[in-house]
Image: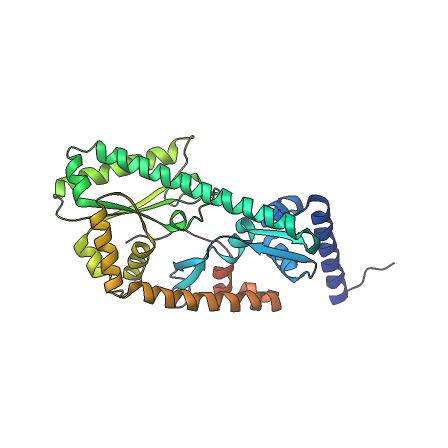
Amino acid sequence: MKNPVGRPWIIIERILRMEKLIHLLEVHGPLTGKEIHEKTVMNLFDLWEECNQCADIVTKTIGTKYLRLDKHVEGFARLSPSIIREFYNYTVLSLKEQSEEARIKAEELHQSIIKISKDKLALAKDIMEKIIAAQPDPQGIQEKTCFIIAGDVAYDMAHLEPRPEFSTGKLVNGSDLDIVIVYQDLPEERIKELDSAIYDWKFYLLKHPGYKEEIDYVIKDLATVERQLEFVGFESMVAAKVLEEGQFLCGNQALFAEVKRRLVEGGIPEVLEDLKARASLEREQARKRLLACRDSINDQEMRQLFYTTDEREEFF
């Protein structure tokens, strides 16, 4: 039998791939996108496309989609995790008759992600409290600063997928520890000492084989926060977004409450909700476009929404 040429052969290839995926799920039961990728070694875009277009495959996504501001996307607003990160780490795929198994696996996956997030949160809290205790004036730091954690950890969406740290290229264990330190009436000397201590810990955690964690941090006073809440320009928008999503880590809880009060007073939560709604709409439109026309993946903005090129959060 001669091989068909042109489009008919492409259709046959797709049918064979779908049959392979169905057989995989029949044999192994529900799998995550990552597990299917490891077993098939298919191109990730092709795998995502086939799984989302096969009528016999059911997808169940867990976790939270949240707003990320990205210079490379028109209007800056997109959702995190990216389309492919969501498929790879946060989606369980199954056959229709495996619904109960899929529900159980999805719940186990969700709980594992929550545990990763809580472990990273506990690590960040422990380190920052050690840093405060080791300062020349720990009481002053405790009273005049608040430590805030943001990013994946704040949403219980942290992961452990190895990725290169931005400045050194060293592989770290997934989501970084995004920490904002806000202070009020803290002497310049104390600020420098605090900055130096966090910087030392940052590189210790990065290089130590038992950790391989990345701390990304910024230190700023309450007056800077107030200016950034004007929400004018990309840097200001990112700073406000990070503070709005952030959770209290340690330090002065009253100062943390004051930061949150000013966010509400400035209408920042509503502005961010509007941006998230727009990003959600654009995400769904991009998803439909990619499934309807696979060549649209060559569009730069489509690629930015689909791939996890850099999930690193910029801090200001």
| Pick the front one: 263 or 136 | 263
Say how many tags the image has: 0
Residue at 18%, 37% in the rendered image: 193
Residue in the image at 72% along x and 59% along y = 14
| Residue 163 % position (x, y) | 46, 44
Q: How is the image coloured?
A: rainbow
| On-image quarter of the C terminus | bottom left
In the foreground, 56 or 111: 111
In the image, residue 237 sits, relative to residue 163, either above or below, namely below
Which residue is located at x 74 percent, y 49 percent? 23
Q: In what quadrant of the picture does the N terminus appear?
A: bottom right
Q: Residue furthest right?
A: 1
Residue 293 seen anywhere in this rendered image of the structure: no
- Report whether 153 appears left or right of 102: left
Q: Is 106 left or right of 224, judged from the image as shown?
A: right
**Residue at the location (29% across, 64% down)?**
268
Q: Is residue 216 left or right of residue 228?
A: right
Residue 107 visible? The answer is: yes
From the top left corner, tell me how far across and down residue 240 is, in percent: 29, 59
Viewer-side residue, 128 vs 187: 128
Whole-percent x, y for residue 298 in the image: 55, 64
What x and y, as percent, mark residue 86? 52, 54
Question: In the image as oriented, which residue stretches furthest toward the front?
Answer: 100
Tell me which corner region of the image, top left, top right, bottom left or bottom right, holds residue 61: bottom right
